[in-house]
Image: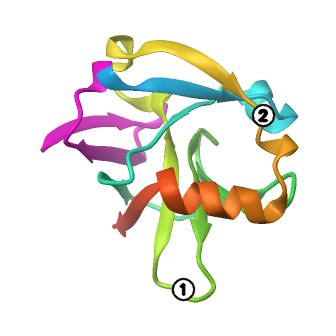
Amino acid sequence: MNIYSGACSCGLVKIEFSSRLELSDFEARICDCDFCVARNVKYISDSSGHLKLTSEGDLNFYQQGSNQAKFIACTQCDDIICASYKNLVEPERFIGSLNVNLLSNVSLLKNSVTVSPKKLTASDKLERWEQVWMPISFQK
């Protein structure tokens, strides 16, 4: 397993992304919604991987668009850490997609591609997230 690390701008939230894939295998996705564009967020995920967030404080949770996903952000610098989804059937299970800009070795990624989740129906979004997003765990 490869482990890639990073942090938000202020360092309050530490990130550990585990994947069997090399970072150079990933093509970041640029969401074209106003929220993500304004924050210059690019996402990667690996359904076989894992995202661990360690925070010295609380986290902010924002909802946008269809209000299905929650964007997890640092309370101090307000960097978006990841987009996440909590399944109502399994409320202890968080899955999500990492803002790759926060990784220390982001330069290893392939070129980015723009995506438009707002064109998907609510059920199509959930189905896609369940297929491609990764488990998230939290630690203080």
Residue named by callout 2:
116
Near-viewer residue (131 or 104): 131
According to the image, what is the colour scheme of the structure? rainbow
| Crowd rating for badge 1 (residues with CA inside 10 Å; few <14, some 14–19, many 20+) | few
Q: Residue 124 vs residue 105: left or right?
A: right
Q: Position of residue 63 (x, y in %)?
A: 78, 59
Dot 1 amino acid type: Pro
Q: Name the quarter where the C terminus is drawn.
A: bottom left
Residue named by callout 1:
91
Asked if residue 5 is among those painted magenta in the image, a careful observer would answer yes
| Crowd rating for badge 2 (residues with CA inside 10 Å; few <14, some 14–19, many 20+) | few
Residue 1 in sight from this viewpoint:
yes
Q: Residue 45 vs residue 85: left or right?
A: left
Q: Position of residue 60 (x, y in %)?
A: 64, 59
Q: Which SS class for mark 1?
A: loop
**Residue at position x 87%, y 52% in the image:** 65
